[in-house]
Amino acid sequence: MAMEIALWGLVGSLAAVAIAELVLRFIYGVGNPPLYVADTRSGYRLAPNQALRRRGNYMAVNQYSMRGPAIAPQPDSHTLRVLMLGDSVVNGGWWTDQSQLLSVRVQAALSEQLSTQGQEVEVLNASANSWGPRHELGYVRKFGTFGAQIVLMVLNTDDLFAIAPNAYDLGRHPAYPTRRPPLALGELVAKIKPYRPSPRLQALYDQPGDRVGVNLEAIRQLQQTVKAVQGRLVLAMTPLKRELGQAGPQDYEKAARQRLKNLTQAQAIPYLDFLPQLQSLEADSLYRDHIHLSPAGYHWVGQQLAQFIATAGSPSTPEPSIRTEPAAMEDVLGDLW
């Protein structure tokens, strides 16, 4: 009798585990996280050619690790192509459905503005969580600008303090897996366990020196790279939510922001700072958390970015024969790694 009870108990436990596994996997998408790969230039990027659904949100990554559908290496002659670079604000993460992405919002708004000109618009989304200017420069050095007439870098205040590209904790940090877990329950347990950065990663955070200056130099070098292929770099910055309060940015953030503004003026880079606009609005509904935008925020910022791009204009599309491939520019650009 006791053995029979124990057997039924075991069967019940296994059934409970199986039900939990099915619910986590097929309702919440746990066990199927977005995967990452190491990269010698950008440190890491989303693994190419993957599609998944998490908590009802669809996420697709193309052959170039972009958040979006597969693309041709070069745009059609009648298409305005914009290459958008950024961190999790641009990427959206698994918590943002593909249809709500900032790049999708910009494309829709820009298409509407340019509809009378008979021009198609394509906005590419090259981004990853926690990327900074050096990651984005590394991505462009590896893949080029895909014939984009405009390269739009979207920063947030924290990006000015980003560490150097690396893959030290790739596959170790639960938010940056390199393989799918055998069980959804395994992913859940991994997220609950406390995480500590590896000593090598911690050393990058502790590294002395002018981190802001190095990131600004990455932006300057990206400007050189984009100009070399007859494109135009434009820059926008979204603030942290706490910067919208009465106190505004902290003193060290104000200093970094001013240095960025000085760089854009010196390099003639069109620059849109969202801080003044958002400080004048009731912006709570535009933020998902302290840094990421909500769907309403993506819609509003997307409208502003589309207007910004249309106002900034774009250079004429050059003939392919005069384009310079990124590999040919390696010798003239300094190494920020």
Image (spheres, rainbow, N blue to C red):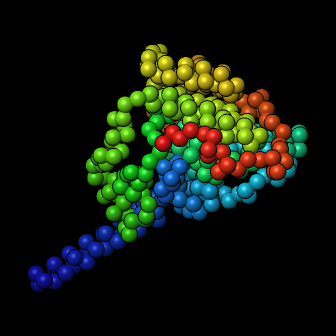
Residues 323 and 333: in front is 333
User: Quick one: quadrant of the N terminus?
Assistant: bottom left
Position of residue 26 measured from the top left corner of the image (x, y, whole percent): 47, 65
Residues 250 and 1: in front is 250
* Res. 180 image quadrant: bottom left
> Which residue extends farthest left?
2
Question: Quick check: 169 above or below 109?
Answer: below
> Which residue extends farthest right?
117
In the image, taking residue 96 as reference, residue 182 lies left or right, namely left
Residue drawn at x 49%, y 19% as measured from the top left: 254
Residue 105 visible in the snapshot:
no
Position of residue 130 measured from the top left corner of the image (x, y, whole percent): 47, 42
Position of residue 3 measured from the top left corner of the image (x, y, whole percent): 13, 83
> Which residue extends farthest front?
331
> Which residue extends farthest top?
246
Residue drawn at x 74%, y 43% as measured from the top left: 229
In the image, taking residue 226 as reference, residue 98 lies left or right, namely left
Residues 127 and 29: in front is 127
Residue 183 visible in the snapshot:
yes
Question: Total marks drawn?
Answer: 0
Question: Quick check: 166 above or below 217?
Answer: below
Residue drawn at x 56%, y 38% as measured from the top left: 334
* Res. 206 image quadrant: top left
In the image, taking residue 147 as reference, residue 257 lies left or right, namely left
Residue drawn at x 84%, y 39% as measured from the top left: 316
Residues 203 and 327: in front is 327
Position of residue 181 measured from the top left corner of the image (x, y, whole percent): 39, 65
